[in-house]
Each structure stands twice: as structure tokens, then as C-alpha cells.
Image: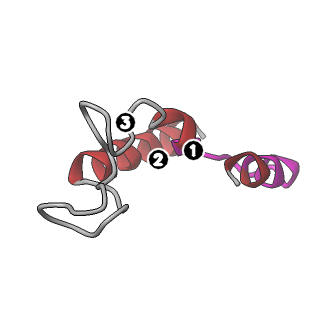
Amino acid sequence: LAEVTRDAAHSMGIAVVDVATLSADHNACSRQPWVNGISPKSGAAFHPTITGARATAQAIAKQLAES
């Protein structure tokens, strides 16, 4: 899905923040997860943690500043 989205955006000249690559080492089972597992203490299951949301926002802000 990430590859198809990236390719479609690039074909239209749209910048993409590749969060799939950015967060590759931060899955729900990692030492520093950016996404909740099945039974989170806070937030929704399989949704970004506050750390993941911040990292995503920072990457988007960086992309916008470079555009």
C-alpha cells in the first residue's frame, strides 16, 4: 500500500512523507514503538502513540519546509 501510494503521488508531482520507511524500526513490538499493540494502556489499538504522532508531524513539517 505504501509503495502504491508513493508511486501515485510521485506520478502527480506530489511530495510524500514516507512514514512506512520512517517508522520501520518502531512497530508495536519494538523497544520504541510508534504504534500501539492490541491492548494499549492509552489510545486505540494499532493507532499511533504520541511519540509516533510527533515523529510523523515533525517529518511532515520538515517536508513542507523543504518544499
Q: Picture coordinates of residue 27 (x, y %)? A: 39, 41
Query: In which quadrant is the N terminus drawn?
Result: bottom right
| Residue range corresponding to the magenta coloring | 6-19
Mark 3–mark 2 distance (CA, rounded to whole Å): 17 Å
Q: What residue type is labelled 2?
A: Ile
Residue 50's disc is none
The crowd level at tag 1 (other Cα within 10 Å; few <14, some 14-19, many 20+) is: some
**What residue is pinned by disc 2?**
60
The crowd level at tag 2 (other Cα within 10 Å; few <14, some 14-19, many 20+) is: some
Q: What element carries label 3?
A: loop
Residue 13 belongs to the span the image colors magenta = yes
Foreground tag (3 vs 2): 3
- In the rendered view, tell whether residue 38 sits above or below residue 65: below
Residue at 24% across, 45% down? 51
Residue at 34% across, 45% down? 28
Mark 1–mark 2 distance (CA, rounded to whole Å): 6 Å
Mark 1–mark 3 distance (CA, rounded to whole Å): 16 Å
**What residue is pinned by disc 3?**
26
Residue at 49% across, 40% down? 65
Query: In which quadrant is the C terminus drawn?
Result: top right
Q: Is mark 2 on a helix, strand or loop?
A: helix
Q: What residue type is labelled 1?
A: Val
Q: Of the two numbered discs 3 and 2 on the same chain, state the one appearing first in sequence.
A: 3
Q: Disc 3 vs disc 2: Cβ atoms closer than 8 Å?
A: no
**What residue is pinned by disc 1?**
17
Q: Of the two numbered discs 1 and 3 on the same chain, state the one appearing first in sequence.
A: 1
Q: Which of 38 and 3 is in front in this view?
A: 38
Q: What residue type is labelled 3?
A: His
Residue at 74% across, 45% down? 3
